[in-house]
Image (cartoon, rainbow, N blue to C red):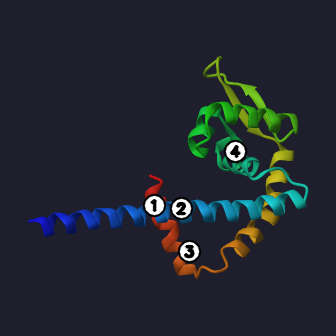
Amino acid sequence: MYETICKCMEQKISSSIAKIGAWVALNRAWTRISGAVEAQLKRAGHPPLAWYDVLWELEKAEACCLRPIELEARLLIRQHNLSRLLTRMATAGLVKKLSCPEDGRSLRIELTPAGRRTRKAMWEIYRPALDAALEGLAPAEARQLAEQLDRLGR
């Protein structure tokens, strides 16, 4: 019985260590890759990577317009951080803050033509930076990794 308990404990500890290792590796990869992309964007005179994500979500949205709460859900950014980010982006002329006809207390965030151009220009830097950062992955490995991470993100 003692051996069974020990074996069970070893399996749990081993599983926990493997999961912690995966978490550390995921964070290390994210830090390295996002840092490389941020550096490339900065060198090219573009805004930070977080701006790209907002611009892309707006561009994909119907009528290129979303409420902040919708952006918050799509981007997983906390409300106070998103609010400050949107203010900076509006000041830069990349988005417009408009009143929401359905809810007078809310806003709609609309992508401007300058925002669309900026997103496209950023992608010209972002895509090759991602390709370079992930060049060690074969296409099948990249698909498998994407599937596993997508499963964890649900």
Q: Nearer the viewer, residue 5 or 136?
A: 5
Residue at 83% in and 63% down: 40
In the displayed structure, 19 sits above or below 100; it is below
* Residue denoted by label 3: 142
Evaluate if marks 1 and 2 touch, with contact meaning CB atoms under 8 Å apart.
yes
Give left or right: position of 117 versus 134. Answer: right
Give left or right: position of 20 versus 36. Answer: left
The amino acid on which the numbered mark 1 sits, given as a three-letter code, is Ile
The amino acid on which the numbered mark 2 sits, given as a three-letter code, is Val
Q: For numbered disc 1, what is the local secondary structure?
A: helix
Query: Residue 20 bears which disc, if any?
Result: 1
The amino acid on which the numbered mark 3 sits, given as a three-letter code, is Ala
Picture quarter containing residue 25? bottom right
Q: Residue furthest left?
A: 1
The amino acid on which the numbered mark 4 sits, given as a three-letter code, is Leu
Query: Residue 58 bears which disc, if any?
Result: 4
